[in-house]
Amino acid sequence: MSLTINIIGAGRVGKTIGKLCVSNTVGKILGVYNRSAKNAAEAVTFIGQGSPFYSLEDLPAADITFITTPDDAIEPICAELVALKRLRKNSIVLHCSGSLPSGVLADAKSCDCALASVHPMRGFADPELSVAQYAGTYCALEGEEKATEILKPLFEALGSITYFIRSDKKEIYHAAGVFASNYLITIAQEALNCLAEAGVPSEIAMNAIISLMSSSVNTLKESQSPEKALTGPLKRGDIHTIEKHLNAMHDTVLTQDLYRAAALCTLKLTTLPEEKKDAITALLNETTS
Protein backbone atom coordinates (compact mmCIF):
# COMPACT_ATOMS: atom_id res chain seq x y z
CA MET A 1 0.00 0.00 0.00
CA SER A 2 2.79 2.42 -0.92
CA LEU A 3 0.62 4.61 -3.15
CA THR A 4 -1.46 7.33 -1.55
CA ILE A 5 -4.79 8.25 -3.16
CA ASN A 6 -7.22 11.15 -3.05
CA ILE A 7 -10.73 10.95 -4.45
CA ILE A 8 -12.37 14.19 -5.60
CA GLY A 9 -16.11 13.60 -5.90
CA ALA A 10 -17.93 11.35 -3.44
CA GLY A 11 -20.56 10.05 -5.85
CA ARG A 12 -21.24 6.53 -7.07
CA VAL A 13 -18.08 6.19 -9.17
CA GLY A 14 -15.79 7.68 -6.52
CA LYS A 15 -17.20 5.46 -3.78
CA THR A 16 -16.94 2.33 -5.94
CA ILE A 17 -13.32 2.96 -6.98
CA GLY A 18 -12.34 3.94 -3.44
CA LYS A 19 -13.85 0.77 -1.98
CA LEU A 20 -12.17 -1.38 -4.63
CA CYS A 21 -8.79 0.27 -3.94
CA VAL A 22 -9.10 -0.52 -0.23
CA SER A 23 -10.43 -4.07 -0.61
CA ASN A 24 -7.69 -4.93 -3.12
CA THR A 25 -4.98 -3.08 -1.12
CA VAL A 26 -3.66 -1.15 -4.12
CA GLY A 27 -3.07 2.02 -2.13
CA LYS A 28 -4.03 4.06 0.88
CA ILE A 29 -6.93 6.51 0.67
CA LEU A 30 -5.91 9.80 2.25
CA GLY A 31 -8.81 12.10 1.49
CA VAL A 32 -12.30 11.99 0.00
CA TYR A 33 -13.55 15.40 -1.08
CA ASN A 34 -17.09 16.57 -1.71
CA ARG A 35 -18.65 20.02 -1.44
CA SER A 36 -21.19 18.41 0.89
CA ALA A 37 -19.61 17.45 4.23
CA LYS A 38 -22.36 14.87 4.76
CA ASN A 39 -21.70 13.17 1.41
CA ALA A 40 -17.95 13.18 2.02
CA ALA A 41 -18.41 11.54 5.43
CA GLU A 42 -20.83 8.94 4.03
CA ALA A 43 -18.37 8.10 1.25
CA VAL A 44 -15.52 7.57 3.73
CA THR A 45 -17.75 5.25 5.77
CA PHE A 46 -18.59 3.26 2.63
CA ILE A 47 -14.97 3.12 1.43
CA GLY A 48 -13.69 2.17 4.87
CA GLN A 49 -10.61 4.39 4.78
CA GLY A 50 -9.54 8.01 4.48
CA SER A 51 -10.74 11.31 5.90
CA PRO A 52 -13.64 13.41 4.61
CA PHE A 53 -12.97 16.91 3.25
CA TYR A 54 -15.33 19.59 1.99
CA SER A 55 -12.63 22.18 1.41
CA LEU A 56 -9.98 21.49 -1.23
CA GLU A 57 -7.62 23.81 0.60
CA ASP A 58 -7.38 21.29 3.47
CA LEU A 59 -6.80 18.24 1.27
CA PRO A 60 -3.36 16.60 1.69
CA ALA A 61 -1.38 15.97 -1.50
CA ALA A 62 -1.29 12.36 -2.75
CA ASP A 63 0.50 10.16 -5.28
CA ILE A 64 -2.71 9.70 -7.29
CA THR A 65 -5.64 12.09 -7.51
CA PHE A 66 -8.87 10.67 -8.88
CA ILE A 67 -11.35 13.29 -10.14
CA THR A 68 -14.68 11.46 -10.21
CA THR A 69 -16.97 14.46 -10.46
CA PRO A 70 -19.56 15.13 -13.21
CA ASP A 71 -17.87 16.03 -16.51
CA ASP A 72 -18.52 19.78 -16.31
CA ALA A 73 -16.67 20.00 -12.99
CA ILE A 74 -13.50 18.13 -13.97
CA GLU A 75 -11.56 20.98 -15.58
CA PRO A 76 -12.51 23.61 -12.95
CA ILE A 77 -11.66 21.22 -10.09
CA CYS A 78 -8.26 20.51 -11.62
CA ALA A 79 -7.58 24.23 -11.98
CA GLU A 80 -8.60 24.78 -8.37
CA LEU A 81 -6.29 22.01 -7.15
CA VAL A 82 -3.42 23.65 -9.02
CA ALA A 83 -4.22 27.11 -7.67
CA LEU A 84 -4.37 25.77 -4.11
CA LYS A 85 -1.16 23.76 -4.60
CA ARG A 86 -2.90 20.53 -3.63
CA LEU A 87 -1.13 18.44 -6.29
CA ARG A 88 2.19 16.79 -5.53
CA LYS A 89 4.98 17.23 -8.07
CA ASN A 90 5.37 14.17 -10.34
CA SER A 91 2.07 12.70 -9.07
CA ILE A 92 -0.74 11.32 -11.28
CA VAL A 93 -4.00 13.13 -11.95
CA LEU A 94 -6.79 11.28 -13.72
CA HIS A 95 -10.50 11.50 -14.34
CA CYS A 96 -13.04 8.79 -15.05
CA SER A 97 -15.18 10.47 -17.70
CA GLY A 98 -16.08 8.38 -20.71
CA SER A 99 -16.36 11.31 -23.11
CA LEU A 100 -13.51 13.66 -22.11
CA PRO A 101 -9.81 13.15 -22.89
CA SER A 102 -7.06 13.50 -20.33
CA GLY A 103 -6.15 16.81 -21.96
CA VAL A 104 -8.84 18.60 -19.92
CA LEU A 105 -6.45 18.20 -16.97
CA ALA A 106 -3.75 20.24 -18.72
CA ASP A 107 -3.56 22.78 -15.87
CA ALA A 108 -1.90 20.08 -13.74
CA LYS A 109 1.11 20.04 -16.08
CA SER A 110 2.32 23.18 -14.30
CA CYS A 111 2.83 20.89 -11.27
CA ASP A 112 4.71 18.33 -13.39
CA CYS A 113 1.84 15.87 -12.95
CA ALA A 114 1.24 12.96 -15.32
CA LEU A 115 -2.26 12.97 -16.84
CA ALA A 116 -4.65 10.17 -17.78
CA SER A 117 -8.26 9.17 -18.05
CA VAL A 118 -9.59 5.75 -17.09
CA HIS A 119 -13.18 4.86 -17.90
CA PRO A 120 -14.75 1.65 -16.59
CA MET A 121 -17.40 0.67 -19.16
CA ARG A 122 -20.21 -0.22 -16.78
CA GLY A 123 -23.12 1.40 -14.98
CA PHE A 124 -22.65 2.64 -11.41
CA ALA A 125 -26.28 2.96 -10.27
CA ASP A 126 -25.60 1.25 -6.91
CA PRO A 127 -22.05 1.40 -5.43
CA GLU A 128 -22.57 -1.72 -3.28
CA LEU A 129 -23.68 -3.70 -6.33
CA SER A 130 -20.98 -2.14 -8.51
CA VAL A 131 -18.26 -3.28 -6.10
CA ALA A 132 -19.70 -6.81 -5.93
CA GLN A 133 -20.01 -7.10 -9.73
CA TYR A 134 -16.94 -5.14 -10.78
CA ALA A 135 -14.59 -8.05 -11.60
CA GLY A 136 -14.26 -8.39 -15.36
CA THR A 137 -15.23 -4.77 -16.09
CA TYR A 138 -13.63 -3.44 -19.27
CA CYS A 139 -11.63 -0.25 -18.68
CA ALA A 140 -10.43 2.19 -21.35
CA LEU A 141 -7.18 4.05 -20.67
CA GLU A 142 -5.60 6.98 -22.44
CA GLY A 143 -3.07 9.61 -21.48
CA GLU A 144 0.62 9.94 -20.72
CA GLU A 145 2.71 6.80 -20.48
CA LYS A 146 4.13 7.87 -17.12
CA ALA A 147 0.58 7.71 -15.74
CA THR A 148 -0.82 4.71 -17.62
CA GLU A 149 2.13 2.46 -16.81
CA ILE A 150 1.07 2.73 -13.15
CA LEU A 151 -2.70 2.91 -13.65
CA LYS A 152 -2.92 -0.14 -15.93
CA PRO A 153 -1.70 -2.65 -13.29
CA LEU A 154 -3.58 -0.75 -10.57
CA PHE A 155 -6.93 -1.12 -12.36
CA GLU A 156 -6.14 -4.72 -13.30
CA ALA A 157 -5.62 -5.38 -9.57
CA LEU A 158 -9.16 -4.06 -9.03
CA GLY A 159 -10.48 -6.69 -11.45
CA SER A 160 -10.51 -4.60 -14.63
CA ILE A 161 -9.77 -5.79 -18.15
CA THR A 162 -7.79 -2.82 -19.51
CA TYR A 163 -7.22 -1.56 -23.03
CA PHE A 164 -6.01 1.67 -24.62
CA ILE A 165 -7.98 4.06 -26.81
CA ARG A 166 -7.06 7.17 -28.78
CA SER A 167 -7.35 10.44 -26.87
CA ASP A 168 -8.99 12.17 -29.84
CA LYS A 169 -11.73 9.52 -30.11
CA LYS A 170 -13.24 9.65 -26.62
CA GLU A 171 -16.58 10.99 -27.89
CA ILE A 172 -17.23 8.12 -30.32
CA TYR A 173 -15.94 5.65 -27.73
CA HIS A 174 -18.47 6.97 -25.23
CA ALA A 175 -21.27 6.82 -27.82
CA ALA A 176 -20.61 3.06 -28.05
CA GLY A 177 -21.37 2.72 -24.36
CA VAL A 178 -24.59 4.71 -24.74
CA PHE A 179 -25.72 2.42 -27.55
CA ALA A 180 -24.88 -0.74 -25.62
CA SER A 181 -26.25 0.38 -22.25
CA ASN A 182 -28.61 3.37 -22.24
CA TYR A 183 -30.33 2.67 -25.54
CA LEU A 184 -30.73 -0.99 -24.68
CA ILE A 185 -32.99 0.22 -21.86
CA THR A 186 -34.83 2.49 -24.32
CA ILE A 187 -35.42 -0.46 -26.64
CA ALA A 188 -36.72 -2.49 -23.71
CA GLN A 189 -39.23 0.25 -22.86
CA GLU A 190 -40.45 0.45 -26.46
CA ALA A 191 -40.89 -3.33 -26.50
CA LEU A 192 -42.86 -3.10 -23.23
CA ASN A 193 -45.10 -0.44 -24.77
CA CYS A 194 -45.87 -2.74 -27.70
CA LEU A 195 -46.67 -5.65 -25.38
CA ALA A 196 -48.90 -3.43 -23.25
CA GLU A 197 -50.88 -2.46 -26.36
CA ALA A 198 -51.18 -6.17 -27.15
CA GLY A 199 -52.73 -6.71 -23.70
CA VAL A 200 -49.84 -8.54 -22.04
CA PRO A 201 -49.77 -8.05 -18.23
CA SER A 202 -46.88 -5.80 -17.16
CA GLU A 203 -45.06 -8.36 -14.98
CA ILE A 204 -45.16 -11.02 -17.69
CA ALA A 205 -44.15 -8.44 -20.30
CA MET A 206 -41.09 -7.33 -18.34
CA ASN A 207 -39.87 -10.87 -17.71
CA ALA A 208 -40.52 -11.86 -21.33
CA ILE A 209 -38.46 -8.93 -22.62
CA ILE A 210 -35.62 -9.63 -20.17
CA SER A 211 -35.63 -13.30 -21.19
CA LEU A 212 -35.52 -12.43 -24.89
CA MET A 213 -32.78 -9.83 -24.44
CA SER A 214 -30.74 -12.23 -22.31
CA SER A 215 -31.08 -14.91 -24.97
CA SER A 216 -29.88 -12.50 -27.66
CA VAL A 217 -26.92 -11.36 -25.57
CA ASN A 218 -25.97 -14.97 -24.84
CA THR A 219 -26.14 -15.81 -28.55
CA LEU A 220 -23.97 -12.79 -29.33
CA LYS A 221 -21.48 -13.89 -26.67
CA GLU A 222 -21.32 -17.41 -28.07
CA SER A 223 -21.05 -16.36 -31.73
CA GLN A 224 -18.88 -13.26 -31.17
CA SER A 225 -20.60 -11.89 -34.28
CA PRO A 226 -23.65 -9.60 -34.65
CA GLU A 227 -24.22 -11.04 -38.13
CA LYS A 228 -24.36 -14.63 -36.83
CA ALA A 229 -26.48 -13.68 -33.80
CA LEU A 230 -29.15 -11.87 -35.84
CA THR A 231 -32.61 -13.45 -36.15
CA GLY A 232 -36.06 -12.18 -37.13
CA PRO A 233 -37.86 -10.83 -40.21
CA LEU A 234 -34.94 -8.72 -41.47
CA LYS A 235 -32.64 -11.73 -41.36
CA ARG A 236 -35.24 -13.67 -43.41
CA GLY A 237 -36.10 -10.77 -45.71
CA ASP A 238 -39.76 -10.97 -44.64
CA ILE A 239 -40.89 -7.64 -46.06
CA HIS A 240 -44.60 -8.31 -45.43
CA THR A 241 -44.04 -8.78 -41.69
CA ILE A 242 -41.98 -5.59 -41.53
CA GLU A 243 -44.77 -3.73 -43.33
CA LYS A 244 -47.32 -5.07 -40.83
CA HIS A 245 -45.15 -3.90 -37.94
CA LEU A 246 -44.97 -0.39 -39.37
CA ASN A 247 -48.72 -0.28 -39.94
CA ALA A 248 -49.33 -1.40 -36.35
CA MET A 249 -47.29 1.58 -35.14
CA HIS A 250 -49.14 4.23 -37.16
CA ASP A 251 -50.38 5.96 -33.99
CA THR A 252 -46.93 6.10 -32.36
CA VAL A 253 -44.70 8.01 -34.77
CA LEU A 254 -41.62 8.11 -32.52
CA THR A 255 -41.75 4.34 -32.01
CA GLN A 256 -42.21 3.84 -35.75
CA ASP A 257 -39.28 6.14 -36.50
CA LEU A 258 -37.09 4.24 -34.03
CA TYR A 259 -38.13 0.94 -35.65
CA ARG A 260 -37.30 2.31 -39.12
CA ALA A 261 -33.88 3.63 -38.07
CA ALA A 262 -32.96 0.42 -36.23
CA ALA A 263 -34.12 -1.69 -39.18
CA LEU A 264 -32.04 0.29 -41.67
CA CYS A 265 -28.93 -0.26 -39.53
CA THR A 266 -29.80 -3.93 -39.00
CA LEU A 267 -30.27 -4.49 -42.73
CA LYS A 268 -26.51 -4.04 -43.16
CA LEU A 269 -25.95 -7.19 -41.08
CA THR A 270 -27.98 -9.41 -43.42
CA THR A 271 -26.83 -11.40 -46.44
CA LEU A 272 -30.04 -10.77 -48.40
CA PRO A 273 -29.89 -10.28 -52.18
CA GLU A 274 -29.43 -6.65 -53.15
CA GLU A 275 -32.86 -6.41 -54.77
CA LYS A 276 -34.47 -7.60 -51.52
CA LYS A 277 -32.43 -5.11 -49.51
CA ASP A 278 -33.47 -2.34 -51.91
CA ALA A 279 -37.15 -3.22 -51.51
CA ILE A 280 -36.94 -3.24 -47.70
CA THR A 281 -34.96 0.02 -47.72
CA ALA A 282 -37.64 1.66 -49.87
CA LEU A 283 -40.34 0.50 -47.44
CA LEU A 284 -38.43 1.75 -44.41
CA ASN A 285 -37.78 5.13 -46.03
CA GLU A 286 -41.43 5.75 -46.88
CA THR A 287 -42.72 8.97 -45.34
CA THR A 288 -44.79 8.33 -42.21
CA SER A 289 -48.41 9.23 -42.89
Image (tube, rainbow, N blue to C red):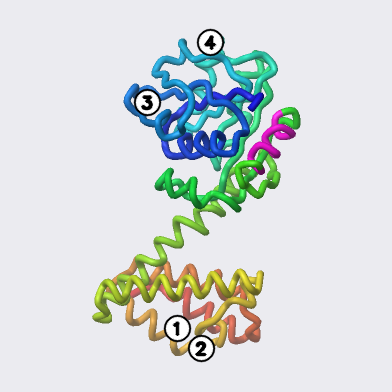
Front tag of 4 and 1: 4
Q: CA distance from mark 3 to mark 2?
A: 59 Å
Specify the segment rendered in magenta.
147-156
Label 4: state its secondary structure.
Answer: helix
Is disc 4 in contact with disc 1, using a CB cutoff of under 8 Å? Answer: no
Under tag 3, what secondary structure? helix
Residue pointed to by mark 3 = 41
222 horizontally vs 144: left or right = left
| Closer to the camera in the image, 227 or 32 | 32
Q: Quadrant of the C terminus?
A: bottom left
> Which residue in the structure is indicated by mark 4?
83
Residue 250 in view, yes or no: no
| Pointer 2 local density, CA inside 10 Å: few below 14, some 14–19, many at least 20 | few
Badge nearest the viewer, 3 or 1: 3
Callout 1 crowding tier (Cα within 10 Å): few <14, some 14–19, many ≥20: many
Residue depicted at x 35% and y 28%: 39
Q: Visible in this render: residue 145?
A: yes
Kind of residue at badge 1: Ile
Q: Which residue is mark 1?
A: 242
* Circles 2 and 1 in contact, beta carbons < 8 Å: yes
User: Residue 238: which numbered mark, if any?
Assistant: 2
Tell me the SS state at disc 2: loop
